[in-house]
Image: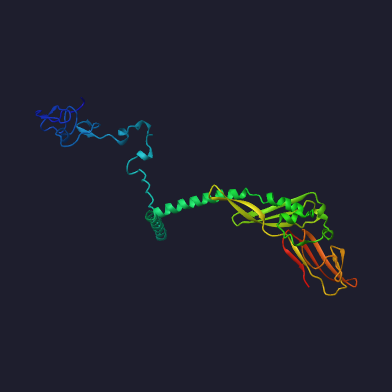
Amino acid sequence: MGFSEGLDDEFLLICFVCKSPFGILAMFCGECGCKRDQALGIERASTRQQIVNNALVTPSFIQQAPDAQAIPEEAPYFATPSSAPAAPVAPKPKRESVKKQIRRQNRRLRIEALSNFQERHAIALNLSGTVLFLMSTYMLVQSFIFSQSNPLATTQVALELGPQRNPAYFQLLGADTNTKTFPTAYLRWDANTATDWLTGYTVNGWLGKATVWTIPGSSKLGDDRIEMELKPEYRMVYGIFRQINWVPSNPPATIELAYPSDRTIAIYFNGLAAGTVGNPTIKEGTYLIYPGPLDVTFYRDGSYYDGYSYFIGAFGEYSTNY
């Protein structure tokens, strides 16, 4: 087998490794080449060891490596231990500062406190969440219903009749039938002839407020607009929601005429003579008046004495106080 037979003595022992007999004083097994301690079972034998000239030959690291053929010869990593480079030392982990540790601990404590609070008040939190969800759903649906209500649907006709000086204008706005109407002959307004009017509105169904306005479509006719305020009339829908019907919230505009005490003073409305204070064509009092500009001027002895200038809207109270 290529191994020495050991010392010349009798073969009275059995090798623990290969089960072959070897001498009682032999230092090696002549059959498998293991050392005496290994043959006696005192030391574990290696499967790679070799015996040359009665001496144990220990294979090198490269010979034992399963991929020894792939390792280049004389590589610096497989040199002798004395010439091998030192293994890199792993950097020590940077110690976290005390402030960061405190912040992390505080954050963990706050999270734990919040978690404990949620566990203790789980029923109340779930109930409040359900209530908030139902309320938000109700508000969304109710807001959608409010958005479908258009105040122009009920005021469009009135906004058209006012500039046209149509008496039905006052009826639509619920005017007092016992109040006289200001003569339309003195209410000249170039926009009366406008065939195109621009309308718009602002509305808030939750607050119950709406404002509708209209303005002549031509800039040559001025930029004064007529405004009308509205109030809601609610009716229930599906038992819990409200639908709005917008109606005028104010009666039509009125003007209270009062003249100076000098009876010789001349009166003019929108540049048209209306007699004197002693003999006016429009007597003092309160009148329903259509929307539009109104200039009241007084002259004494051909000179300007006093005057008032208004733009009458769809509602409001105006006066010439003396």
Total count of labels: 0
Q: Is residue 16 left or right of residue 142?
A: left
Q: Is residue 264 above or below residue 158?
A: below
**What color scheme is it?**
rainbow
Which residue does the image show at 72% across and 54% down from the upper left? 172
Locate the N terminus by quadrant: top left
Q: Is residue 251 left or right of residue 262?
A: left
The quadrant where residue 27 appears: top left
Residue 103, position as x, y percentages in the image? 42, 59
Residue 249, position as x, y percentages in the image? 67, 58
Q: Is residue 146 left or right of residue 161?
A: left
Which residue does the image show at 80% across and 62% down from the upper left? 294
Q: Residue furthest right?
A: 302
Q: Is residue 283 above or below residue 233?
A: below
Choose between 224 and 103: the one closer to the eye.
Answer: 224
Choose between 104 and 81: the one closer to the eye.
Answer: 104
Locate the C terminus by quadrant: bottom right
Q: Is residue 241 above or below residue 175?
A: above
The quadrant where residue 205 appears: bottom right
Choose between 35 and 153: the one closer to the eye.
Answer: 153
The quadrant where residue 56 appears: top left
Q: Residue furthest top?
A: 1
Residue 182, position as x, y percentages in the image? 80, 61
Q: Residue furthest front?
A: 178
Residue 225, position as x, y percentages in the image? 75, 57
Q: Residue furthest bottom?
A: 262
